[in-house]
Image (spheres, helix red, strand yellow):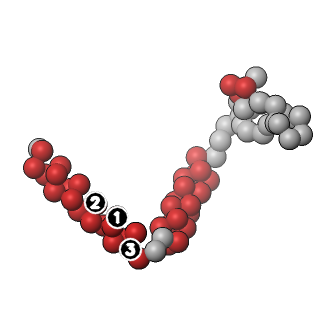
């Protein structure tokens, strides 16, 4: 049953949670993804944000020269 998210928890010995064949809410998952991304980026220090912007810019330059 592990493949369905029903692995046995080590602390309690009970089955783990997860979606067991039911449908997932795609809209809620997408909203959670965006929310988590915004929270992660807003928690970064300014130096990391500058490094990310520079890395994206350099990546675009490399892609432009490759194609």
Do the residues bearing badges 3 and 1 touch, measured as CB atoms within 8 Å?
no
Q: Which mark is residue 52?
A: 1
From the image, which quarter does the N terminus lie in?
top right
Question: In what element is the residue under mark 1?
Answer: helix
**3 or 2: tag closer to the N-terminus:** 3
58 with respect to 20 (left or right) = left
Q: Secondary structure at mark 2?
A: helix
Location of residue 5 with respect to 35 vertically, above or below: above
Which residue is painted at 64% across and 46% down in the image?
25
Residue under the image location 62 percent in, 53 percent down: 28
Q: Position of residue 6 (x, y in %)?
A: 77, 30
**Decide: marks 2, 1 in contact (CB < 8 A)?**
yes
| On screen, residue 56 above or below 22 | below
- The residue wearing badge 3 is 47
Q: Which residue is mark 2?
A: 56
- Relative to 22, 10 lies left or right: right
Furthest residue toward bottom: 46
């Amino acid at each position: 049953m592990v493949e369905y998210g029903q692995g046995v928890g080590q602390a309690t010995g009970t089955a783990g949670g997860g979606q067991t064949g039911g449908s997932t809410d795609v809209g809620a998952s997408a909203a959670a993804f965006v929310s988590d991304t915004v929270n992660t980026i807003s928690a970064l220090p300014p130096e990391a944000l500058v490094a990310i912007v520079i890395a994206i810019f350099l990546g675009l330059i490399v892609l432009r020269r490759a194609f």
